[in-house]
Amino acid sequence: MVYAALTGVILWVSALAGGWFENLATFNHLPEAIAHHPLGRKLGCERMKRLADTVDANLSGWTTSIVLGYLLGFVPVIGKFFGIPLDVRHVTLATGTVALAAASFGKDWFYRGWLIHTAFGIAVTFVLNLGVSFSIAALVAMRAYGVPWHDQLGLMRYTLTAFLKSPPASCSLQRRQGSNPKEPLRRFLILHDQGLRLD
């Protein structure tokens, strides 16, 4: 469980690196520089524009994935170097390991109750990975906006309640056409600026 929580911290750090790099690229107008690069005279302006749009849309995800991969690989090595028992427990890696183990053990996997134990372990790993990463990200974001502590607790309680009431809807990436995914946060900040407390 400690390793799963540590992996949640690693997930947050990788997302933070992705956001930082995207901000750096936006501040330095990297997409615009790609779109107007002299190479466009040979490849064509439209191709450079598409490349710029691709970089702009995926740069944060690329950076997050690269940093996450390095952190997941190097944390155990760094822990071993300093004599600290560090390891990572990522839900995706754990699920892949379980699938390989199930293929190796065959029918014994079901008869001896190993499937139930491993499924429970993967569920705990998932909750800790997601919970720790989301909690740190939410606290940092609300602290950056200067949200009072009682409002932070109210928002976290509201989010947890919404997830428990409808987990599929809370985790869904789909949204209505034309809707703004930042609208709930915007409404909360408006309420906060007006001095209203969450119920």
Image (spheres, rainbow, N blue to C red):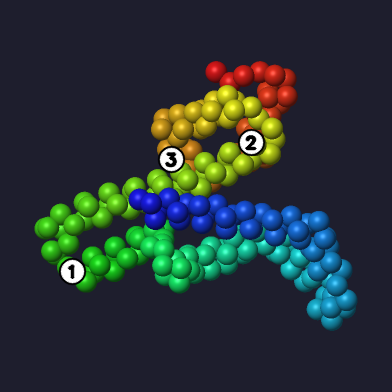
Q: Residue at x 26, y 55 (%)?
A: 118
Which residue is tagged 2?
Answer: 142
Q: Secondary structure at mark 1?
A: helix
Which residue is tagged 3?
Answer: 168
189 up-or-down from 31: above or below: above
Most foreground residue, 192 or 182: 192
Residue 28 image position (x, y, % from top left)? 82, 60
Residue type, numbered disc 2:
Met
Q: Secondary structure at mark 2?
A: helix
Q: Nearer the viewer, mark 2 or mark 1?
A: 2
Q: Nearer the viewer, mark 3 or mark 2?
A: 2
Q: Residue at x 52, y 65 (%)?
A: 71
Could you classify mark 1 by the number of other residues whose Cα lies within 10 Å: few (under 14), some (14-19), or many (20 or more)?
A: few
Which residue is tagged 1?
Answer: 105
Q: Quadrant of residue 184?
A: top right
Can residue 4 be seen in this snapshot?
yes
Q: Residue at x 64, y 27 (%)?
A: 148
Residue 199 located left or right of residue 39: left
Q: Residue at x 25, y 67 (%)?
A: 101
